Amino acid sequence: MLKNYFKIAYRSLLKNSVYTFINVAGLSIGIASALLISLWVYDEVTYDNMQSKRDRLFQVWVHARYTDTTAVSYTSMPLALWDALKTADSRIKNVSTTDWGGSHLVAVGDKSIVKDGYYVSTEFLDMFEFR
């Protein structure tokens, strides 16, 4: 009996091949879209979960409005804010700064290499746990 159902379904799919293609293509695009959206949401939800202090880490952002239609958000702050945050609130334990990133020369004795990376302040390793 089940064999007859498959036979009838196969004949129907061949008879209506244009509609079959449209339905199968739509279903596959829908499934692929749902999987990609699910992976994106998972990545956003689990971002930086390797940090045990993630509930106590914050990043300072500036939201600047230049005109009624132009608004910009960025993380660039003046260095004086670093000192001000350290003394502003007793609940702030550590404050770390970084540079813009890029190629830096690292030298020890006669050996030197150029690597891409960031300069960070000493509190960075107290705030983040890296091996």
Image: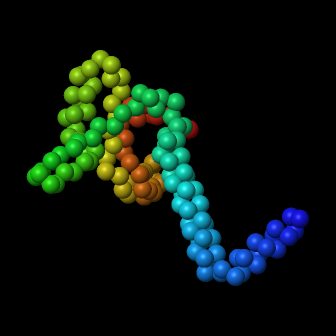
Instruction: Classify 33 as above or below 92.
Output: below
In-image side of 128 versus 1 (left or right): left
Q: Where is residue 17 in the image (x, y as percent from the top left)?
A: 65, 81
120 and 74: which one is in front? 74
Q: Position of residue 43 (x, y in %)?
A: 51, 48
Residue at point 41% right, 51% down?
117
Image location (x, y in percent) of residue 85: 25, 28
Residue at figure coordinates x 60%, y 65% from the top left: 27
Residue farthest left in this picture: 67
35 or 84, nearer to the observer: 35
- Can residue 115 be seen here? The reply is yes
Q: Is 45 displayed left or right of 121 in the figure? A: right
Q: How many labels does the image show?
A: 0
Q: Which of 41 and 31 is in front in this view?
A: 31
62, above or below 94, in the image: below
The colour scheme is rainbow
| Residue at the top extreme of this rendering | 90
Q: What residue is shown at x 72% (from left), y 76% (from top)?
A: 12
Q: Where is residue 118 in the image (x, y as percent from the top left)?
A: 38, 48
Q: In this view, does 83 lie to the left or right of 7?
A: left
Residue 32 seen in render: no
23 horizontally vs 89: left or right: right
Residue displayed at 21% across by 28% down:
84
Quarter of the figure with residue 76: top left
**Placement of the C terminus among the 4 image quadrants:** top right
Which corner quadrant of the image does residue 96 belong to? Answer: top left
Quadrant the N terminus occupies:
bottom right
In the image, residue 75 sits, relative to residue 10, either above or below, namely above
